[in-house]
Image (cartoon, rainbow, N blue to C red):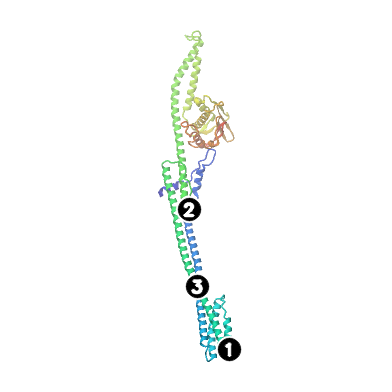
Amino acid sequence: MRKLLNAILAFGLKRRPSLASANGAPETAGTVASEQQLGTYVFSVRTKGLVVFGALIAYAVIIALFVFHQKTLLLRDFEQIQKSLEVDSMLKQADTAAFHAVMGVFANVDSADRDAGMQRIQMHYQILRTKHAELKQTLPQFDLSLNAVDTAVAHAVRDPSRDNLSHLIVELVRAKNEFTNLAEQSQQARKRMSDNYRMQTDTVTMTTLLLGMMGLALLGTIMALFFKKLTEDLRTLQNRAIDIVNGYRGAPIPIQRHDEVGQLMAAVNSMAVALDKREKELIVERQKYFHQEKMAAIGALAAGVAHEIGNPIAAISGIAQDMAERRAEGVGPCNLDHCRPCRPDLIQAQTERLAAITREISEFASPQAAEPQLLDLNAQLRSTTSLIRYDKRLRRVELNLNLDSKLPAIHGVADQLTQVIMNLLINAMDALEPVMDRPPRIVISTSFNADRVCMTVEDNGPGMDADVRERVFEAFFTTKPAGKGTGLGLSLCYSIMKKHGGSIEIESTPGLGTRVLVYFPINEIT
């Protein structure tokens, strides 16, 4: 399989000469498209692989960025939980300090030494103040105030009475309760943050896993579709290559790829077009060879027929001439009185006509040079038309020759030019068969301008439309009924004129007729 495709690609990439139409137009659009697609392609298979690999890397980067972003958010939440733990610990320490302060006041309410008792109370309260200051520094938004406790402490210091100490106990208990409430709120907030942290962790984990699985599934799907399409296209290429080897010359493979496989498809299409072209050229060359063989056989047969007919014609002509002389002299039984109905002059006229025909056949059958030589185009036209006049299709057609007597000699092969003239006349006669509304007419003319000789074959037949006119020189294209034409006549004429360094053009108007212009160079020997 690989060797077959490599051979097709190597064949398709070879530069081939353009198969131009008769008027110099380029090849068909399908052939030009194939030629253009052979040299360039947009995305190679390697490029597609790199694109998929790049997309995979980009997808992995996106997932990594997502993970890093979520990690940042999770770290922030974790730091908040850590900070919540620190705050909770500080609140518990403040609550404990408030409790110790309350217990210190209780222990010194009935103390005998009031001053020593107040010092111990102030010591416990100072610890509470320190914890409160740490909370304020850690949490600027912390709004718990100890102003009421400060006032109660100041009163107790000035007057450590039982009432003032009782009031201090009440304020300390109120402060402790507030610390306890704040500690409980902090614990609840930390619990919510912990729950949210666990939920967010699970979400990030599942999302990352889902994205990874989606990426793998997408990559697997793309690869499966790519290799499925690649396999189908390669199988199509293989089948088409086998079909072409077996003789398929139909529609080209539709090219929907822009990589090496698309290039290979274009090469296969181009190979099919090239093979079809070469096969048609081979058929045309065979037709030329068959024509030469047929002309040689016809020439040999015509020479033999002319020789066999010539002897009795000469005898009949001699007898008729003798009869005419005897009648003129009145000698013998064939005198004017006894042989008035006899017309030897008519016999002699008809024998001379037969002799002229045999001379034309002999001239037509005479061996022709296979190499280009100087030729009289007017003489070629007269010789060919004198024979083709016997075609029954010309019985109702007026054939006129309008030849330039000062026409210079041209270089060419006489047999091939005869073939061109006969093909053009046969096409004109076939075109005139359906004409009934006007006298059918063929006009053959020659002219000369600065550097070339022009031969024109014009008819007043139905003409051709633009689509037919663009394809008339294609091999095997014909508008004649089945069995009446092969579509090689004008193609052979075009090929012969190209080899002679000349050209052939067609001008046609639907409903009015067709004019074929054949140009011969006078300064070029092919």
Quick one: which residue is furthest to the top in this view?
A: 337
Could you tell me the amino acid type at mark 3? Gln
Q: Secondary structure at mark 2?
A: loop
Residue 484 is tagged as none
Residue that badge 2 annotates: 44
Residue ID at (46%, 17%): 316
Which of pointers 3 and 1 indicates the residue nearer the eye?
1
How far across and down, in percent of the image, does residue 237 sit? 43, 47
Q: From mark 2 to mark 3, how far is it between C-alphas?
A: 62 Å
Report the number of discs.
3
Which of pointers 2 and 1 indicates the residue nearer the eye?
1
Which of the 4 image quadrants contains residue 219?
bottom left
Above or below, 270 against 180 in this view is: above
Residue that badge 3 annotates: 188
Say whether disc 2 or disc 1 marks the residue closer to the N-terminus.
2
How far across and down, in percent of the image, does residue 43 sit? 49, 53
244 left or right of 440?
Answer: left
Q: From mark 3 to mark 1, how far is it between C-alphas?
A: 42 Å
